[in-house]
Image: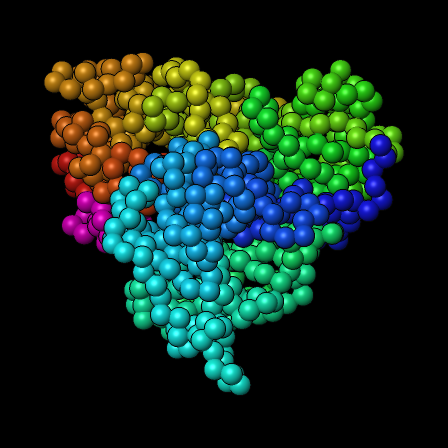
Amino acid sequence: MMKATIICGCLLAAVATKAQNPFVQTWCTSDPAPMVHDGTMYVYTGHDEDGADFFWMQEWRVYSTTDMVNWTDHGSPLALESFSWADDRAWASQCVARNGKFYWYICAHSKLSGGMAIGVAVGNSPTGPFKDAIGKPLFENGSWDHIDPTVFIDDDGQAWLMWGNPQCYYLKLNRDMISYSGELGKLDMTEEAFGGPMMRQRQQGKKYKDSYVEGPWLTKRNGTYQLLYAAGGVPEHISYSTAPSPTGPWKYAGEIMPLSETNSFTNHCGVADYKGHSYFFYHTGKLPNGGGFGRSVAVEEFQYNADGSFPTIMPTDEGVKPVDALSPYRRVEAETMAFSKGLKTEQNDAIGVYVTDIHNGDYIKLQNVDFGTAWPTSFTARVASGLRGGQIELHLDSIRGELLGTLSVPGTGGWEQWQSLTTDLTPLTSPVANHDLYLVFKGRKGPKLFNFDWWELGGVKSRTVEDGGTGAYKAVMKEEPTLPAHTVFVPKDLSAFSKKKGLPVLVWGNGACTDSPWEHYKFLNEIASHGYLVIATGYIPMEEKPYRGPMSTTEQQIASIDWAIAQNADPQSPYYQKIDVKHICAAGMSCGGLQTLYNCADKRITALMICNSGLFNQQNAHQAVGGMPMPPKEKLEEIHTPIIYILGGETDIAYGNGMDDFHRIKHVPACAVNYPVGHGGTYRQPHGGEFTVPALAWLDWQLKGDSKAARMFKGNSPLLLQREGWTLEKNAKLK
């Protein structure tokens, strides 16, 4: 059957190139609830059914992003069927993390009481699977106003649950997050608190500033509690009130998002901070054939006022700017998109979520794609088609932009008979940089063409990390074909370096002897941006995700040194006479520190840096993980260079071993610095966090001869001690 000219449901027919709102186009979504966890922004939404004439909602959905523009659809891990007591109206919800679990608070119609009820599901990951945590509603009493729960964990660990229309209720949750203590509380719905009382309590003829309606969102800033909510009646705008405690007294603070042309008579908001930015989530009815019962989630960036209050935030079609880049040199789920036309997503247990309903002229847009330092050479996609297939064209910056290449998709014998196909790409004349990438689908006009699971680009992988770092030389993380199983961090522009001003070298071993620097890449990239060639053991991490392969070896660190020396001597190498091979620091974290100490006798090494590590002695050798190098304490006698231990304080499991090493070293300059964060350090924080400070100072002193950097450690008043939290010990050789 031919595809309708007017696309049914909430599919997008056409959109301006710059539009990013609504940020989900494949389904109608509502009531966004953001949650930041482990470096990822998640948004939990409702799902308005296509063509609905009321809020006939059956499930909840999850979307995530690491750059705020490219969103991955995780499908529907929670639905009415997840709750044996629920039979209709899967309305607004919110998820929160606590103690390694994720608690998703929902409201739904209860067949037990005949009213709306508050329920809670629990999962071990932000995307599930989730299950009903208690097998019954968390709260119900037969009333219809128990809707739109919000959950907030206070600084003291107390969790609060609020909900309601037109009365705002609250409960104090217990630590288990699935039970509560005390009686059901009610906020005072007064004019002072919310700009006006509840509608049924209003005086006829009196004009009020505002009124609470529904959709509360509880948060806190600068010690003040803020309750955001849909306000004013129908149509709704967003307002907020403030209080010194969650129970009040609340004071009306004003509108945040005034009434606007959103094509939706309801609104529902959530706020979250992410990667140094503040975001306001809400919903509109702006998808084609959308409206009051076909809503769509959107987001705006904003800045709090100096006193922590909210500014006025207006809805836009443009949405927000990216805060990171998308790497195409890894498997990218097809359901990851910044914008799309004409598509749906489906899911099953075998595949997960995939893109479907693909027709001629439909497309997926990816924004701010980091192509690295060289154009890709191939495109691979996993697809399935019943009969006829089609093509996937790759265009830069617009649907008719420069063509990278085309993948032909044949019939595969069924809509779930999947094949992985690859095509070569054409090198382009455009400068290699960050571009928008359009996957444009072509084929016979009318019929569905194929289903689409995932894709990736082939070639030498590279990635710009945190805009290249804060140093004077913007860095890039990349593979080098001549150095397998290693990751290189280096300034993008090598023109500033020469035989007279070469790049000092840092060779790095990873924690847990992992064969990828996935935990340390921000830290290492930041060092490279200050004018270093950093060579880490293991495969390039195209995303901050644990590596599950075999452990690395001590020999890989030596191979790093060999490679740097060979590249500096090779006239065909881009590094020719640009590397300072007389200044090499060997370093590593945890197990990588043990690898470094194992290699310490190598005469080419001119400095050592041991992070969250130290040699085991006979008394605690049983604590070592299998596969770790286990040199004895006598190995310390082979050290012939200055050495620094950077440890995480007394809670660092390596603290005892590292400090024992330091106290044994008398024959070379040595120091030990501690910052009380435990064994994990600060490597995964932006730009490597606080651990980057002594690391860079040590490298600048030992490898570049920087006397100012030396003052971080030397003298009676080392500069490092002026930074809060640091302690420093030195041996007699370093005084």
- Secondary structure mostly seen in the magenta stretch: loop
Percent position of residue 583, x then y = 38, 31
Q: For the magenta stretch, what is the residue range?
A: 708-727
Q: Is 419 situated above or below 209?
A: above
Of residues 85 and 441, which is closer to you in this image?
85
Pick the front one: 103 or 463: 103
In the figure, is residue 448 to the left or right of 727? right
Left or right, 120 with reference to 372:
left
In magenta stretch: residue 710: yes
Residue 264, horizontal then vertical, whole percent: 64, 60
Quadrant position of residue 331: top right
Between 351 and 107, the one nearer to me in the picture = 107
Identified at 49% across, 29% down, the residue is: 541
Q: Residue at x 67, y 52 (%)?
A: 53
Does residue 83 appear in this view? Answer: yes
Report how many numbered discs are placed on residues in the image: 0
Left or right, residue 166 beside residue 331: left
Does the magenta run of residues contain 565?
no
What percent of the width, then of the height, locates residue 555?
A: 39, 15
- In what quadrant of the picture does the N terminus appear? top right
**In this view of the protein, which residue sits in the foreground, 697 or 377?**
377
Residue name at image x 44 percent, y 18 percent: 549
Q: Is residue 66 visible?
A: no
In the figure, residue 527 lies in which quadrant? top left
Type of colouring: rainbow
| Residue that lies at the very extreme toward the bottom in this rendered image | 205
Classify residue 420 by image quadrant.
Answer: top right
Q: Which quarter of the figure is the C terminus placed in?
A: top left
Image coordinates of residue 305 in percent, x first then y, are: 45, 69
